[in-house]
Amino acid sequence: MEDSAVEILSASTPKPRIGIDGGDDNKNWRRRVNGVEVSVPIVCGSIAFYRGKKAKEYRTHNWTVYVRGATNEDLGVVIRKVIFHLHPSFKSPTRVVDSPPFTLSECGWGEFKIDITIFFHADACERKLELSHLLKLNPEIYSGPQSPNVPVVTESYNEIVFPDPFECFLSRVNNHPAVHVSKLPEGLNLPPPGDADDESYYKMKKGDTKDHPLSHWFLKFSDADELFRLTDTRQKVQADIAKLKRQLVMVDAQPE
Amino acid sequence: MGGTDAKDILGLPKTPLSLTQEKKSRPQKESHRKPDGISREVYALTGGVAPLMPSIDVTHLKRPPPPDEKVAWQWLPVKSSARKDDLQLYHWVRVVNDVPPTGDYSFAKYNKSVDVLKYTDDEYENHLTDPVWTKEETDQLFELCERFDLRFTVIADRFPLSRTVEELKDRYYSVTRALLRARAQSPAELANHPLIKEPYDMTRDRERKRALSMVLSQSRHQEKKDAEILAEAKRITEMRLAARRAAEPDVPANENIGSVSPSSNSQLPATAVAPSTLTMADYASTLASLRMLHVYLRTYGLEQMVQAASSAVGLRTIKRVEQTLQDLGVNLKPKVPTKTVCDEHLELRKEILTLLNLQKQLQYKESEGSSHREGTYGAMPDTPKDRVFASEPFGFGAERPIKKEPKRKGPGRQSDTPSPAHKRPRKLKASDL
């Protein structure tokens, strides 16, 4: 995908987005850079602390659910707001977090699936993204009574992918530590950031999760192990394929 | 056992929620609750729960006979036109209003007999001689045909010489045909005679019986396999249609084909089945639709691509790919799905698919080489020389017994011309449909 040329949405190609994006004023910056992929590594998770034996029946755990950058960078560069849909038994179960860090703390007793809706800045994408996280309060393997000091941490890694991003978005987030940008095509001139930008980002409060009180418990995600395992396995499989091909040739070569 | 009894044993309350709800929901049917004629205790056994077996509506049972009809059953003699002797038999008859049924015995019409032609000595000499059959044998055959109304299995059983049912049939029908021809004034008058129009074909009859026995001797396992193959073939044809439709207007999507899986393209020969144009079209359209989303989760993208990669293969193959992944100790869903990890994961899946296809090819070729025996489908081909082909050659379903026949006749022929069809046994079936 990286090597395909930059294609600018001219008048001849369909422009389904432009109508939705609304502004004819900043039309020039609403060009998509084809073949480039912007990805944002995120971690969706929850941390739950047992409140001890004296806790009330319906308030056994303090928990926090969050969407954070995989390296705890500020996700506000891409995400405008996050809505956490809690279990209907909670008071006002739809919780909107409109500034980073996108975390939500509550107190409860039950595990349930939290649906999470992520909204992006207008220059990134008008569409929202849905994901879900299973809130875990109790450890998978029971090993004696739960300690109030060691939380149950459940995290999953994912990436938000923006294929063919808008030029203005690309120029704004390029080189931002929270964002990965695939190799830019040669000769691409990005407009200066902030020129035709969406205002919401600049008004927004900044906030990474590097110094978050819970950051001690955040898991580290690295694809190195998995990648090693995959390349190793692929080599084995390729060797098997080569062996089978030789056998096939042998079978073919057998005289009648 | 009734519902209430069961509830008693389980210690549940006698009127659970469902029962009360049911009562509320249909109060107008209250009259049906306990019909007359059933004691309260018996009815209570059903406990308001639907019966396990379909029961007859009580109103049907209690329907009175028409008032002006008096029905009686009587032991009366039978008069049957089918009976040539004077033996008098009796049976029970339903007599309505004292009027016994008249007319012939109702089963007499089924007493059909066949007119077996008779030939004279002259006729036999002129038309019916056969090097394999003597006149005595033929006479005997016709006698038995007459006696047993052409029930050839019985005739074959009584026939003193050992001849197959087909041989007996063939002799009988050819003699009858020759007689008909010889006695007819003009060929036109015989044109529509069933025996002339559709003459008995011994080889075909044998083939028919062989095919039947093949189907009947199929194990349930083989039957399941056949059904799977057919379902898969259907799926593939549908997929092809869909892919063709999707691929044609999607010109910009095709640009990406090269970049999706460059490695698998360069590594595999044309015979490998996995990265067919079909799969590539699926890939391209999936990529295009992902790009149309403008934003998606990496895991979602991977899922879609995995689906596209396995769209051309059957459910069983997908399961085998996943089983292989697990055996190799690879996560079915990557824990850290970065772009590189996802790409590698996809490539690995594709390679496993190629591997499985090659295994299948090898097995097919080998089984073809071993005088076309079947039943080696599922085994791993790692030790091809040690394998014992134990199963009977009744492997395939009834779909192509005739096609396979000429192959079996020549066990010395190791392989037919190596057409691509033989390299891809399953695809062949798909295109056959």
Image (cartoon, grey):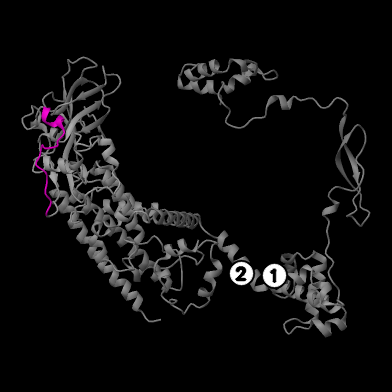
The secondary structure that dominates the magenta segment is loop
Q: Taking B348 as reference, is A51 left or right?
A: left
- Mark 1 element type: helix
Q: Taking B128 as reference, is A125 left or right?
A: left
Q: Nearer the viewer, mark 1 or mark 2?
A: 2
**What is the spatial separation of the Cα atoms under label 1 and label 2, in whole angstroms?**
13 Å
In percent of width and height, residue A191 lies at 11, 44
Q: Is tag 1's residue or tag 2's residue first in the polypeptide sequence?
A: 1
The circle on residue A233 is: none
Where does the N terminus of chain B fall, quadrant-wise? top right
Chain identifier of the residue bearing label 1 in the image: B
Residue contact between numbered discs 1 and 2, judged by CB atoms under 8 Å: no
- The residue drawn where x is 16% and y is 33% is A198
- The residue drawn where x is 37% and y is 67% is B361
Crowding around mark 2 (Cα neighbors within 10 Å: few <14, some 14 to 19, many 20+) is some
Q: Which residue is mark 1?
A: B165
Residue A220, above or below B259? above
In percent of width and height, residue B287 lies at 28, 50
Q: Amino acid at mark 1?
A: Val
Residue B253, above or below B25? below
Q: Amino acid at mark 2?
A: Glu
Towards the viewer: A115 or A236? A115
Towards the viewer: B128 or B284? B284
The circle on residue B207 is: 2
Residues in magenta, as a range: A187-204
Residue B24, above or below A208? above
Chain identifier of the residue bearing label 2 in the image: B
